[in-house]
Image: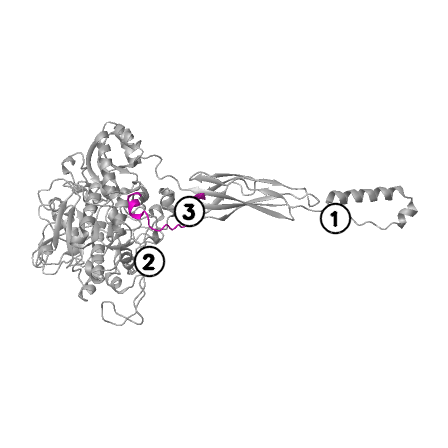
Amino acid sequence: MTRRRLLGIGCTLVALALGLGPSAQAQLPRLLPLPVFNLPPVVNAGLDQVITLPSSANLTGVAIDDGQPNPPGVLTTTWSAVSGPGTVSFSNARALNSAATFSASGAYVLRLTVSDGALAVSDDVAVTVNPAPLVENKIDPALLALMAADPQRLLPVIVEMQQPLPPFLGAVNVDRALEALDLLRFNGVAVAPLSLIDSAAGFANAAGISALSLVPTVAFVHHDATVGPQPNDAPPVPPATPDQASGVYPQVVRANKVWAQGIAGGGVTVAILDSGVAADADLVQPDNRLLASVNFADQRLTSDPGGHGTHIAGIVAGNGTSSGGQFMGIAPQANVVDVRVLGNTGSGRLSSVIRGIEWVLANRTAYNIRVINLSFGAPANLPYRADPMSAAVEIAWRRGLVVVAASGNGGPQRDNLVTPGIDPYVITVGATDDRGTVGRGDDLFAWFSAWGSPDSNAKPDLVAPGRRIVSLRVPGSALDTLFPDRVVVAQNGATYFRLTGTSMATAVVSGAAALLLAGRPNLTPDQVKALLVGTTQRYGQDSGQVLPDPIADGSGLLNAYAATLAVPCETAPSPGPVGLLTGTLQQPTTVACANRGLRPADGFGRALYPVLFGSPLQWIDPLFGGIFWPPLTWDTLVWNSVAWDNFAWDSVAWDSVAWDSVAWDSVAWDSIAWDSVAWDSVAWDTFTLD
């Protein structure tokens, strides 16, 4: 029986009662109050929405009520977040019409709850939040500023192409690079293809760059930024004594304990991408361990005009021949290859470094190259996802090369890291001051060491000695001429050289990586990173120093010996106590995995599309972005930033993908276009760190 019929019957009974006399009325049974039925409110949270950060979602809810209970209740409304990857803020959570802002991209469910005081009803609305575009158009913001300042000036650029479309015939990455080179010939000056990232380097003015950005097959026009060792104008803290120098850094990081086990890096080759490497006795005697030298910078009349690269090579692999063993590197039996990417002025370009990485990839098997040392950087003006250097080092990493990069010398302020040290995959190294002593209690976090959290990735990963580090000298080089006070004389009269910077600390960690790989050649780059980062040691407990932030020194000070004893997370330790290198009985430590849950750079996603095509598709969120992902195939998938955000990169079996669909080092490097326009001067004399 409906409420309306009940009300009608009640009214009839009342009317009948009023028509009877008092005595008759008294004989009627007393009528009970009729029950009042409270219906729940009707609620609608609105239509599902798709927005792009930093936009807000405009919420327009609707609620209807019957006015019950009596006395009339007041409707209360509340917006809340049910699910989503980030936090949600509401402009007015208690109003039907509100605006929601989101801290992160992803799929959210918001709920509108309405109550009349007795009954509450809810309705949900889905909001898909796409990430903010890294760049508003296809031109690097740094280039846009230079274009506005001088529209006619030829500017150094890298033109990156969109990924090729199937079917993939031949070396499709080379084809894409040559297409980019042709576009540069038409719109500017072509220099060289960069097949590693489907790009080409060259020069163009404002009109040419604008024209390039309008080509549909062009993904992005990058500024081919200057790279080099990074200066720092901050005063040394604390000031050093005139004779302070560190030749004890192998003992500080306990590399000498690894040597005692018969492991000194033999058979492992480290690629030194730098200003060149001279054939110093500590590298070529009694056996020549300088296996190759190639040049991707300007013309060189000597092997290392700057002197920086040889110093780095000595920290990695110097064997102390000239000093009678007084000054040795971390892996004194490791091999090195000289990949010159910095010119006579102390600088290079992103493109020269990328070309150097290409060469390393093409020759890694011939020389057993396992580690790339990058003791330099360029200002990180873009997030790593839009950075071509990050894409290049990530490809090298996935091909089995451990990439060790400097955090930069931009401290003590936060977030002055350089690329490629901003990349989350590589091992990024900051610096300490070991005070020239073996003991670690007096060590300090170096004032110049860059740190921060670009793209929410805390960097550096760890620190190593980097102040007044003694290593190889190149007599007559730019640094040797500029800083004669930095010559260090060994006890037997041999001369070495001291330098300060995260460049030096980076080389220390590269040497430690070589030690690890010499003992366990089957380790992957992720495992090497996990072992080095997961086994660090304390330092500075007697110094009284307070770090500028807990993340400033990463996980702590490198401990090369502990890294050799630990077990990576993917490897189950053998039952019972073991001694991996020492022969002693001890239970190894299992370290946490490295590089899990990361999303690679856009250039990586584009360049490796032919490599990944046809491999199993696994997704993080089956409904990400309002798309139902499970039924998609490679033939129906749109391979773009939304797919890269949701693709389960950890699921890829990198050893089994189609690497033969790409080729590197198959195009001649045309050096004649690298004229004076190409090389900005870093000026070695700005390398003022003590």
Q: Amino acid at mark 2?
A: Cys
Secondary element type, mark 2: loop
Q: Is residue 4 left or right of residue 22?
A: left
Q: Which residue is mark 2?
A: 593
Where are the magenta residues, as a range? Answer: 606-632
Q: Quadrant of residue 673?
A: top left
Q: Quadrant of residue 22?
A: top right
Q: Is residue 310 left or right of residue 211?
A: left
* Residue 627 lies within the magenta run: yes
Q: Is the image coloured rainbow, by chain, by secondary structure, or in one colour? A: one colour
The answer for how far apart the CA atoms under marks 3 and 2 are is 28 Å
Q: Which mark is residue 666?
A: none
Q: Amino acid at mark 1?
A: Pro
Q: Nearer the viewer, residue 605 or 634?
A: 634
Q: Which mark is residue 629?
A: 3
- Can you give x and y, in whole percent of width and height, for residue 91 in the image? 51, 40
For image coordinates 40% across by 46% down, the residue present is 632
Query: Can residue 317 be seen at all in this image of the molecule?
Result: yes
Q: As displayed, is residue 286 above or below residue 304?
A: below
The answer for how far apart the CA atoms under marks 2 and 1 are is 66 Å
- Can you give x and y, in whole percent of width and height, for residue 163 in the image? 30, 41
- Looking at the image, tell me whether mark 3 or mark 2 is earlier in sequence order: 2
- Can you give x and y, in whole percent of width and height, for residue 85 in the image? 44, 48
Q: Which mark is residue 35?
A: 1
- Looking at the image, tell me whether mark 1 or mark 3 is earlier in sequence order: 1
| Labels in figure, total | 3
* Disc 1: CA contacts within 10 A as few (<14), some (14-19) or many (>=20): few
Secondary element type, mark 1: loop
